[in-house]
Amino acid sequence: MRPLNSCCSFVSPRKSIPIYLLLSDEQATLIIQAYWRGYKVRVRPDVQELRQWQRELREENCNINKTVQEFWARQENRVWSELLDLCDDADPEAGVSIKVVPPTPQSRVLLYTPAVERKELLTANLSAPTELQRHVNTTAE
């Protein structure tokens, strides 16, 4: 016989108690009804079609990183093609040259940070009494 602390896979010599002895008739009825209702729903043709569609969708989207990279590549190609069309249509004698670079998720720059501007408003000036402190002092006198 092996020691109890050798591994967590200690097998009890006693048999487990059958489930029909652990459940009341009402509990067993509810479990059987739930399984039956689930089966009846799963065999419906529209539900089978939905489950097949979900299975195919999961298989298609198994590599989300590749899907995202392909999406951004398509977006950048679309933007660049539109930009080239604009450059072809532009008047070369206008004398103005504008270089437009489309943003990508990796190169976005945060232009507006409201928290930085509000930080000045949130800092308290402890040397000068505030309007509220003046009001409290005048009412206390």
Image (cartoon, rainbow, N blue to C red):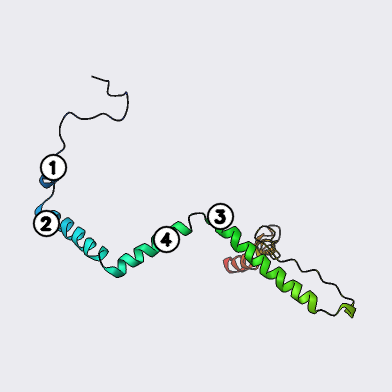
* The C terminus, quarter of image: bottom right
Which numbered mark, 2 or 3, is in the foreground of this view? 3
Q: Evaluate whether residue 125 shows in this view.
A: yes
Quote the CA–CA distance across marks 3 and 1: 48 Å
Amino acid marked by disc 2: Glu
Near-viewer residue (14 or 53):
53
The spot of residue 29 in percent (x, y) is 13, 57
Near-viewer residue (103 or 68):
68
Q: Which residue is mark 1?
A: 18
Q: Residues within 10 Å of mark 2 (few under 14, many from 20)?
A: few
Could you say whether the residue bearing mark 2 is in a helix, strand or loop? helix
- Which sits earlier in the primary sequence, circle 1 or circle 2? 1
Amino acid marked by disc 4: Glu
Could you say whether the residue bearing mark 4 is in a helix, strand or loop? helix
Quote the CA–CA distance across marks 2 and 3: 49 Å
Q: Quadrant of residue 44?
A: bottom left
Q: Quadrant of residue 130?
A: bottom right
Disc number at residue 65? 3
- Which sits earlier in the primary sequence, circle 4 or circle 3? 4
Disc number at residue 26? 2
In the rendered image, the residue lying farthest to the top is 1
